[in-house]
Each structure stands twice: as C-alpha cells, then as structure tokens.
C-alpha cells in the first residue's frame, strides 16, 4: 500500500546531484549553460564541493556520435563528477502521453525538492502506482492538494489565453531547466494549480530539457 501523506526522502546524507542533458550531433549539448548553472547553484546551496574545471573535463569525455545521446552528469558531495552517455531516441512529434494522478504526495516544505538529486523515493513510489500500460507519466500533488510536477517532467497548461501556466516553486517541485527557460522567455508563467485546473478545457503538456514539451492528457 502506498503512502497517502506527503513523502520526504529522509536523511540527506550520501545523495548526489544530477543533471540529465541531451547531446545533438549538429549542436552538441542542449541548454548546457543552464544545466551547469543549476548544478552550481544546487552545489552552493547544499554545501557540495564544486569544480567547473572538473565537470568540463568529464563532459569532454563524451565521444562524438552521429545520433542523439542522453547524458547523465552526477556530482558527489566531495566534488567528484561523473558522466555517462547512452543512445537517445526522440519521441515522435505526434506523441501524447497519458497522465496518472498519484496518491503519493510531496511535502512542499522540503526544500530539497527544488534540486535535482538521487533522492527519488517519492517519485519512485508515485511511478509504481501505475503500470506503463496505464500511464506514461505520473503527476504528484503536495500535502495541500496543489499540483507540483511529474516524476520526470514539469507540468504546463495552455488555456488558450496568454502564456502557459506552470506550478510555482513554493508548491514543492524541481526548478526544471526547460521550465526556467520558458519562464525567462515569457512562454510560461507561474501559477497555483489544482487538479481541477488539469481537468479544465485546454491543452496539457509535460516536459523536460531532455525531451522538450510533450502533449498530454489525463488517463
């Protein structure tokens, strides 16, 4: 049985920071400056050692490929960085993801939720509530019932009037790289969103820096 109340990820000792990037043959790393800026900010806020030169050396180990790659960059508290690369297949343009709503809740007071880390208990619990045949992504609310984020994506709502709306950081969610770009360019604004907002007429999207925006619907 899954927890009905908000989940915290417990003792923070031993966790790592993560950045997941896309590498394209023609352009190299996508949104690299934004990813590195977020990593540096998280390292500063959480007391991690951080050497930009070491991270650059690790990223330089990525071998050129004639196909897109998924790059996973991790940073340990002592400043040790590691990079792994795997083949990446972009989604077809007409993809529509089905969204489940988790019973698992996030705790909006947990400031670690704003950082991308290996502390994944709440997200793994939410994902496990639905099989892959039931939902492509699972949305989490916080303890007050406000919409937060997906297990691997940011949520956006298009009601046909003005910019897309995306949940505010105060609700308890990751400061996503794609999210930050869309806010800074005026393509999105922050809003306090409820489950009813997701059900209103309009278009739902989920997205992240790796995959971009993905059309979605409630399952």
Image: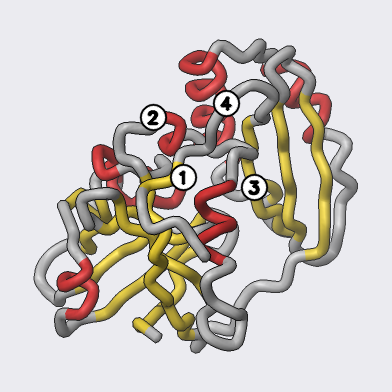
Q: Is residue 67 left or right of residue 188?
A: right
Where residue 102 appears, as percent x and y from the top left, is: 41, 67
Determine the secondary structure under disc 4.
Answer: loop
Determine the secondary structure under disc 3.
Answer: strand
> Which numbered marker is on residue 111?
2
Q: Quarter of the image holding residue 24?
A: bottom right
* Residue contact between numbered discs 2 and 3, judged by CB atoms under 8 Å: no
Residue that label 1 marks: 177
From the viewer's perspective, is the residue at label 2 or at label 4 nearer? 4
Q: Residue at x 50, y 31 (%)?
A: 38
Q: Is residue 104 left or right of residue 60?
A: left
Disc 2 crowd, CA 10 A, few/some/many (<14, 14-19, 20+): few
Where residue 66 appears, as percent x and y from the top left, is: 84, 64
The image shows residue 92, relative to residue 204, as above or below, that is below
Residue that label 4 marks: 11
CA distance separating discs 1 and 4 = 26 Å
Of callouts 2 and 3, the N-terminal one: 3
From the viewer's perspective, is the residue at label 2 or at label 1 nearer? 2
Where residue 61 appears, as percent x and y from the top left, is: 88, 36
Of callouts 1 and 4, the N-terminal one: 4
The image shows residue 212, relative to residue 39, as above or below, that is below
The image shows residue 210, relative to residue 215, as above or below, that is above
Of callouts 2 and 1, the N-terminal one: 2
Q: Toward the viewer: 129 or 203?
A: 129
Determine the secondary structure under disc 2.
Answer: helix
Q: Residue at x 81, y 32 (%)?
A: 82
Residue that label 3 marks: 20
Q: Residue furthest front?
A: 1
> Which numbered marker is on residue 10?
none
């Amino acid at each position: 049985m899954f927890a009905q109340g908000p989940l915290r990820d417990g003792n923070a000792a031993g966790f790592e920071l993560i950045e997941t990037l896309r590498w394209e043959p023609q352009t190299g790393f996508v949104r690299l400056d934004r990813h590195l800026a977020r990593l540096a900010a998280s390292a500063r806020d959480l007391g991690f050692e951080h050497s930009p030169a070491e991270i650059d050396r690790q990223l330089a180990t990525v071998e050129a490929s004639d196909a897109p790659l998924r790059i996973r960059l991790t940073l340990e508290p002592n400043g040790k960085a590691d990079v792994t690369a795997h083949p990446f297949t972009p989604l077809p343009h007409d993809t529509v993801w089905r969204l489940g709503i988790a019973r698992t809740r996030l705790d909006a007071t947990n400031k670690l939720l704003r950082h991308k880390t290996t502390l994944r208990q709440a997200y793994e619990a939410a994902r496990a509530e639905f099989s892959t045949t039931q939902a492509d992504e699972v949305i989490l609310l916080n303890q007050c019932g406000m919409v937060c984020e997906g297990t691997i994506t940011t949520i956006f709502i298009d009601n046909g009037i003005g910019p897309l709306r995306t949940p505010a950081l105060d609700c308890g969610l990751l400061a996503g790289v794609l999210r930050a770009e869309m806010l800074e360019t005026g393509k999105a604004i922050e809003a306090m969103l409820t489950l009813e907002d997701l059900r209103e007429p309009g278009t739902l999207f989920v997205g992240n820096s790796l995959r971009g925006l993905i059309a979605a619907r409630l399952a």
